[in-house]
Amino acid sequence: MNDHSVPRQRELELWAGPECTVNRVGDRYLDQMRYSGFERRLDDLDRLASLGIRRMRFPLLWERTAPNGPASADWRCAEERLQRLRTLGVQPIAGLLHHGSGPRHTSLVDQRFPELLAEYAGAVAERFPDIPAYTPVNEPLTTARFSGLYGTWYPHGRSDREFVRCLLGEVQGTMLAMRAIRRVNPQAQLVQTEDLGYTTVATPRLQYQADFENDRRWLSFDLLCGRVTREHPLWNYLRHHGASEDELLAMVDEPCPPDILGINAYITSERFLDDRLTLYPEHLRGGNGRDAYADVETARVLGAHIGGFQARLREACERYERPVAITEVHLGCTREEQLRWLGQAWTSAQHLRDEGLDVRALTVWAAFGTFDWDSLVTKEQGHYEPGMWDVRGGDDPRPTALATLARELGHGRKPSHPVLEGPGWWQRDLRLLYPHHGELESHAVIGKPLLITGATGTLGRAYARLCDMRGLPYKLLTRQDMDIADPASVAAALDRWQPWAVVNTAGYVRVDDAETDPRNWRENVEGPLVLARACAERGVRLMSFSSDLVFDGRKSQPYVETDPTAPLCAYGRTKAEAEQRILAVAPDTLMVRTAAFFGPWDRHNFVTQALAAMRRGEPWHAAHDQWVSPTYVPHLVQTSLDMLVDGEHGLWHLANRGAVSWFELAQLAAEAAGLDRSLVHARSGAELGQVACRPRYSALDSERGMVMPTLEAGLERYLDEVELPA
């Protein structure tokens, strides 16, 4: 029974899945489920079920389960998890190959590949005859491009002939796999996924190339549906590059049309071809051997907004007249942009259903995040993008705001997060990296604001700058706008601007002067406490800041959140006092302990001043007897904003990972900048004229999650972004 003959369900379903790519690069396998820990945590299935999902894209991958063939398969992991899904009432869609090339004894260009995949598929069906749906090969066309045309993944082909062989092997394998499965379970559905990015051109001269790419994107579906006849626009292309007439016509004679077409739509998949080469840097210039052109993301140059989910779903529905589903929704970006991408995808699917198109579901993808997709999973660098859960906290993944939104969608509730109202970066003019082609469409930033105190300070200005980049409405407040130590002033400001959250960067920061200045207590204890009470009364989220100077330095290992405080100076005492009082009256506050700022936008931080002196050939004196965790301001701001959007609360340590003395920091910065590190001279803190007593060792670590990048990464970004004086 084909699913398209069944009356459409009453409501859009929520599905979900973990990123499960097991791709091969040379002789190495890169395994997303190992990186994310999904392979170890059975209770991840409970987490997914709690969202209200109906189906799960379930990885039952060939390379992991039967690397030496079905006869020696290890079914234990799958058995345990499938049983848990039955208990939870979630139906699996079994994925057998996900951007992979199979076990070591085969590959996508192996003539035996289709039969070997079918052999494994039949063994899966025999072992688990109640699995209702399958995706034997995820995104065959996309995988064939990266494995056979671009040389990215194994077998690293770089020709049209190898691309065609990879694609035909995957499609033939899918057909044979479904026949083997249906011999056991005749009702098994084929849910076939593919990325359907659309190509646009700047000038008519390149329209022929766009037409080819826009025809090619349908090939996996067309082949499965038996549409690639002699009249197909790519028949001659396939024949010219190695496909035999017999194998193409065999797929026409015995098609295997998908029961549900799964559309994976990504911003980066929408491409723009431009022969105006002078507009683009050298690394983007290429061509097809006939014409030279740049191939860039459409959103970065086209003035009009891309069609995205709605356009791709509509095309698929109209072309095949079969049910469709969005089978991957993920965006590696800041949290509010991830929320907007998911929210807009859901809205698009609902609109198409309202028009009468048979859109079945939306799949929240990369439930536990993705690793190293910035390098197309060719390098193990640990670059992580969180999903609905952030796995950097160990064996207890931390839910993000995406999990909250997905749960609201899955249980039929109206999404509630205030940042959803705003447009995504792909709808604002900052998306453009090059002169826009055609009339510019751009949406204004809207929504409830953040209030940011401390308009004259480094941190306050950094939050304002990055809120601009992220499309987060905000008000940057001076003391005249809101005096945090004056209850009437605070109440008036909160009532006037009606914020959803407040970021309090105001405070007394002169550590040595704090020993005798009474303003230290007013600005670091009294003011933050007044603000916390007012926010708690109104249900407004609050983020406030503390310091590594709450510790006495007696530890020899970095301090974590549960270590007792014992400040040595007046500044540290006010910060420790404020922590306790604020969390007592407003326990939902996100209290951030951090340390030793350096950043690219102000000239007064330690690293900027040290490098400026060394560029002038002057010596720089730095303390060798005080160890800290230097914090790159943009990393702090971006991470803490994500956590604020997540609704995170309580005490968190946010500092770049690493422990160095001030002397070593100056040396590291000099070396990274290509300067003479011998200009850095070691001195004691006393020799540098410090009045307040500072801890010998105040490096920070976190037991709640390693969410901040390393110090080395911070220095690298700093040197890329620093604004040097003219």
Image: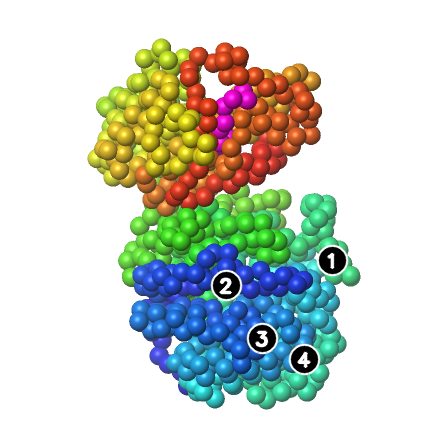
Whole-number angstrom distance, CA of label 1 to CA of label 4: 31 Å
How far apart marks 3 and 1 lie (CA) works out to: 41 Å
Residue 287 picture quarter: bottom right
Q: Is residue 314 left or right of residue 43?
A: right
What residue did someone put label 4 on?
A: 111
Do the CB atoms of the residues marked 2 and 3 lie less than 8 Å apart?
no
Instruction: Kindly state the secondary structure of the residue where label 4 is placed.
Output: loop
- Disc 4 marks a residue whose amino acid type is Gln
Instruction: Name the residue located 33 percent from the left edge and 73 percent from the top edge.
Output: 86
Q: Which residue is mark 1?
A: 287
- Residue labelled with disc 3: 68
What number is the disc on residue 408?
none
Upstream in sequence: badge 3 or badge 4: 3
Q: CA distance from mark 4 to mark 2?
A: 26 Å
Question: Which SS class for mark 3?
Answer: loop
Camera-side residue of 404 and 509: 509
Residue 45 lies left or right of residue 37; in this view the side is left
Residue 586 percent location from the top left of the image: 25, 35
